[in-house]
Each structure stands twice: as C-alpha cells, then as structure tokens.
Image (tube, grey):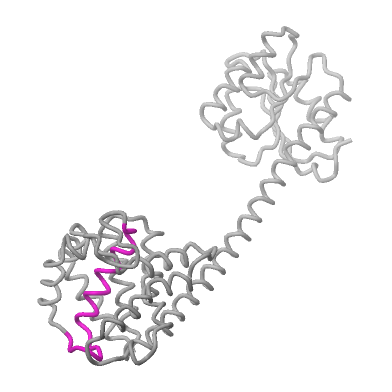
Amino acid sequence: MIDSELRHSRVLICDDSTTNVLLLKALLEAEGLTRIETQTDPRRVLPCLEANVDTDLLLLDLEMPHMHGFDVMRAIRETMPGRADVMPILVITGTAAADAQTQALELGATDFVHKPFDQTEVLLRVRNLLRMRYGYVRQLQISEELERKVQARTQELTRATDAFVHKLAQVCEMRDIETGKHILRVGRMARMLAEACGMPETICFMIERAAPLHDVGKIGIPDEILLKPGKLTDDEYLHMKTHATIGQSILNEHDSLLVQMAATIATSHHERWDGTGYPEGLRGESIPIEGRITAICDVFDALMSQRPYKNPWSEQDAVEYLVSQSGHQFDPKLVDLFVQHINDVERIRDECDAMA
C-alpha cells in the first residue's frame, strides 16, 4: 500500500498511549517504512523535529498530559514556521467535535484519524500525506536544479556579453588613440564614481563594463577626421558629433542590460548639464546618470592623455577644468565627488599604466 519510493520517509509518532504508539509503529513497519521514531511525551516533539530536519510526517495525538496536541502544533508554528508549512501533520483524536478539528486545521493539521482507528484508513491517510510531501520535495529539488541551470546559463551569457563588450571597445580604441588603456581607465574611474554615489554593486559593475563603449560610434567616422592632428572644421566637427547617434544605432535594441546601458552611455556622454550638449540637448538630471559619470571620467582621462591634436595636461590643470565646467558641462555633485576621490583616480591610472 505504501509506495516503494516512500519507504525511506522519516515519520515521527507521538501519542501518550504506549499501546497506540506500538500499534502504529508496527503497522507502518509492516508496510516497509524503516525510519520511524516514537514519543509518548509531547514535550519531546520539538527537540525531535529540530534534530531531524528531514522529518516527512508527524502523527500527533491531541489529548495528552503535560502538553496538548494543540500546544505542540502551536509551538511548531511559532518556533519553526517554515517546517509547519511543508511538513504534513496527521492528527489522531478521540473527539469528533467540529470546533476541535477547525482549531487543529488552523494550527497546521493536514488530516485526521479518529480513535479507535481503522488500520486501513491509517495506512491510506499516511500514504496520501507522504505522497504529498514527496511531491513537494521533488518539486523543490527540480526547481533548485532548474535555478542552478538558469544561474549557470546566465553567468555564461554574462561572461560572453562582457567579453564582447570589451573586445568591441578595444576595436574602437584602436582606431582612436595608440593605446587601449584609456578605455580601461575610463571604466574603472566610472565604477569608482558610481560607488562614490552609493550605487548598488550590480550597477557599478555594469557601468565599469559599459563605459568603455562610450565612443563605439567612432567606428563610423573617417580616419581623416578622427585622426586629424589639427583643429576640425565646422563641417568635420558636425560629422564627428554623429558618433553619438552611430553608437546608439550599433548597440540599441539588444536584450542584454549591459549592452543597453552601453547604448545609453554612447548616446548621452556628450550631453551637457546646462543643456547645450548633443545629440538631444538634454539638461541636468534628465541626462542619464551613467552618461554623466562617463563624461567626467572620459574628459579627465582624455585631457591627461597624449592625442594627435594635443599634448597631455597635468593633473592639476585637468582637475581645474572639471571644476570650471561644474554646473555647465558636468553634473556639479559628480564633479565634487570625483575631486574628493582624486587619490583613487591617481591609483587607477597608476595601476592601468603598469599593466602590460
């Protein structure tokens, strides 16, 4: 009568009648159940459940000395609410009063057997409750396994996307300047500034990975404009400005949140706090914060870097430029945070420059 896959279930029987305990134990053992524990003192039920966290079924008498069955169920619900919700309780009672059954159900009882109990009825109810418990445990195991597989797949896709973003950023940088360390520095500075803003770790990680793609649209700019050593003409400058929308078109409409953030940064990192930037002329906090963060880090590092059209600036001059543009080109609060963490900026630049 008891299914073969249920015979390793752990069952706890509590009844103050030794005779009832022995009868129930013998009945269940005859059906192949091997992990049966018995108690005649209801005060021992809680310690038994705490010692055996894998108990699958509790057979519990109601009318007992020292501690009523209601009190046992109440204690289980109060001290181990998670167990009370998933461990079935088969109440053994000599009363058929409806209010007693209602109270038992409210406290967590799953089913009832009335004294004097019929052996076949007991076995059927035990079997049904063990099936229910087994089904719950199996479903939980399946869900956990699926969750592990989903997490593993998500991590795999995240690593792949991360690698794609990094390689694409390196391609862009190869067309722009002589070293890829600029994109590494910008990413790390952007993360530092995001952390200084108190952003969650996940967002800080994404900003670090997405910020290096801020100039991905420069792939679409001709070399004679992109690498020109002198000042650009008005027409050339207008052409150069299109890299923001080109970057958006390259990265837009991708399912990855990381790539979506990179698209936002590519589009918005040339917007200005005072609304005079491009391509949309956004103003103030209407500019996405990841774009505002990247703008400061990109400009600061670019000023301190050798470019075809200029020599590197000193750190002091670069900081003074950020401060002078606070509230005009840049978010003033972010400029303040950046300057406050200038020692971290120096450390980032030193670490990146030391890399092979």
Residue 166 at x, y percent in the picture = 44, 78
Q: How many marks overall?
A: 0
Residue 98 at x, y percent in the picture = 71, 8
Q: In the rendered image, which quarter contains the N terminus?
A: top right
Q: Nearer the viewer, residue 259 or 191?
A: 259
Q: Nearer the viewer, residue 353 or 165?
A: 165
Q: Is residue 96 left or right of residue 278?
A: right
Q: Is residue 312 above or below residue 282?
A: below
Residue at 65% x, 17% y is 104
Q: Is residue 234 above or below residue 1?
A: below
Residue 211 at x, y percent in the picture = 36, 70
Q: Is residue 343 above or below residue 176?
A: above
**Any magenta on residue 296?**
yes
Task: Name the quadrant containing residue 286.
Answer: bottom left
**Any magenta on residue 129?**
no
Q: Is residue 47 above or below residue 163?
A: above
Residue at 12% x, 82% y is 314
Return the residue found at the far front: 235
Q: Nearer the viewer, residue 48 or 17?
A: 48
Q: In the rendered image, which quarter contains the C terminus?
A: bottom left
Q: Is residue 168 left or right of residue 198?
A: right
Q: What is the span of residues highlighted in magenta in the rendered image?
A: 287-312
Q: Nearer the viewer, residue 333 or 308?
A: 308
Task: Name the quadrant containing residue 199.
Answer: bottom left
Residue at 85% x, 41% y is 3
Task: Name the quadrant containing residue 38.
Answer: top right
Residue 70 at x, y percent in the picture = 61, 17
